[in-house]
Amino acid sequence: MRVAALAGEIDFGGWRKAARAFRQAGVTPEQAAFRVGADGDGLFDESLPPSAPGAPSFSVPKAFVDLAQEVILHRSADRFDLLYRLLWRLAAEPDLMHVVTDPDVADAVERAKNVSRASHKMKAFVRFRQMEDVAGECWVAWFEPVHRVVEKTAPFFVRRFASLRWSILTSDGSASWDGEKLTFGPSATRDMAPAEDEIEEFWKTYYASTFNPARLKTRAMQGEMPRRYWKNLPEAALIPELVAQSAVRTEAMVAASAPEPNARLAKTLSRLNRDHAFDEGFVPSTLSELDQAVQACRRCPLWRDATQGVCGEGPKRAKLMIVGEQPGDQEDLAGHPFVGPAGRVLDAALDEVGIDREDVFVTNAVKHFKHEPRGKRRLHKTPSAGEVSACRWWLDAERRLVKPKVIVTLGATAAFGVLARKVAVTKERGRGIDLTDGAKALLTVHPSYLLRIPDAAAKAAERDRFVADLEQAKVLL
């Protein structure tokens, strides 16, 4: 048996050096042992070389190194042996770390997850208490982590409480921040941290006031806030009583009448919110007034998830108005119509037929971005007929103020917004349609349709038709 002496329970550097020397010397996992504070039996004595002369060097996947750094923080006694067994096997199985069903790999991954959870719990359940020392005010916390995660997690508290002096004491070691430098010290005992402070009662009052009995799920709460941490949480003393009273408090909440509106808050609402958003008699007299008023629109639910309402832009008396479907992701963020990929396609086509976009009033049938989340992305979702009809009030106001001679509608939704009837764009595109206000409508496809055509030849043909439709609009002018 060859024994390697490690300086501490989380001495990853020492374990890594010893494990590398073991493998180079041909020491099998059954012959290797790692002991914290133990004396080596020969291989790692200062008088002996760390590995056999001429032993070849080797490398391991980064995934193994990252995993080992986590597993070594686990409180299990055999973690060093598990990691060396994986290191030994990597010589003959270089892709071992990708075999998630392998018992050793699965065991190591599970232990790493446990360490990550312990670090997360430390971030959530450390409670600092105020005290004074020779340097003045400082904050001290006692914590009992499931695994040895103090050094791993301490940088989080540096970022969170950079302006305070604090210390976190545990039986594994301590971490201290003096406002400039993070240091780690020896283990501590619970009596070395203050038992309570003056702020604690305020915290308990806040916790109790934010406790919602109607949303209480005891099992889920204990899953996120395990009982092992309760003894060090000031608010934990309140939990049994709050849980016991939850049913009575929930019934009282249901039976209570709705509170009166906050009169002070109501006075702070904007004039547009108060006078225009819900006043059917409101008629905007300028495009600027219309743009401001649409921010307060509540005619359909789309305003709830959009960043802002996006009205049209262009000359006050533009002869040509182009109506799209709705703002896209980029338009919703920027607050301007047709600034995304579809807008660039439109600009190029207008330029090709000799129409300056600066002379065109560009808008959308729907003023708020309708979408559904997909990860970090917001994917376009077609507005319903009801949403288009609700927003037609704003489009009609733009038409009344701009008074265009020709309105080009891009896609079926835009056509429905202008004509107030469902249309088949492919059948009615490219020809003038008389409108009740004396203008003519011309239907064509939306530029985003051209972006979605996969075949290059088909895309080129459809783009030529799109340009031809804009040329026809120029003729109608």
Image (cartoon, rainbow, N blue to C red):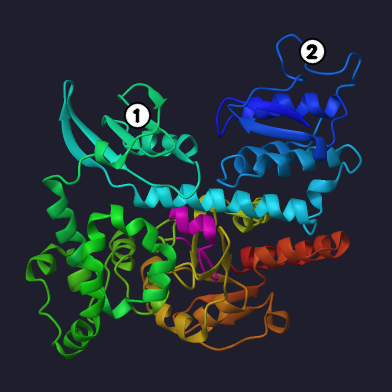
Locate the C terminus and report the quarter of the image it occupies.
bottom right
Q: What residue did someone put label 2 on?
A: 49
Which residues are drawn in magenta? Answer: 318-337
In the image, farthest residue toward the left? 263
Is residue 216 found inside the magenta-colored segment of the image? no
Question: At x 81% / y 54%, what residue is drawn?
Answer: 99
- Residue drawn at the location 79% of the way across and 32% of the way down: 1
Badge 2 amino acid: Pro
Q: Please, is residue 312 above or below residue 44 in the view?
A: below
Q: Which residue is mark 1?
A: 176
Amino acid identity at mark 1: Ser
Relative depth, front residue between 190 and 449 = 190
Vertical arrangement, residue 206 with respect to residue 12, above or below: below
Determine whether label 1 and label 2 are within 8 Å by CB: no
Task: Name the element at disc 1.
Answer: strand
- Residue in the foreground of this view, choosing between 183 and 383: 183
Q: Is residue 159 left or right of residue 48?
A: left
Could one spot residue 441 in this view of the protein?
yes
Give yes or no for residue 329 being in the magenta stretch. yes
Residue at 75%, 38% in the rendered image = 84
The picture places residue 326, in percent across and down from the top left corner, at 51, 68
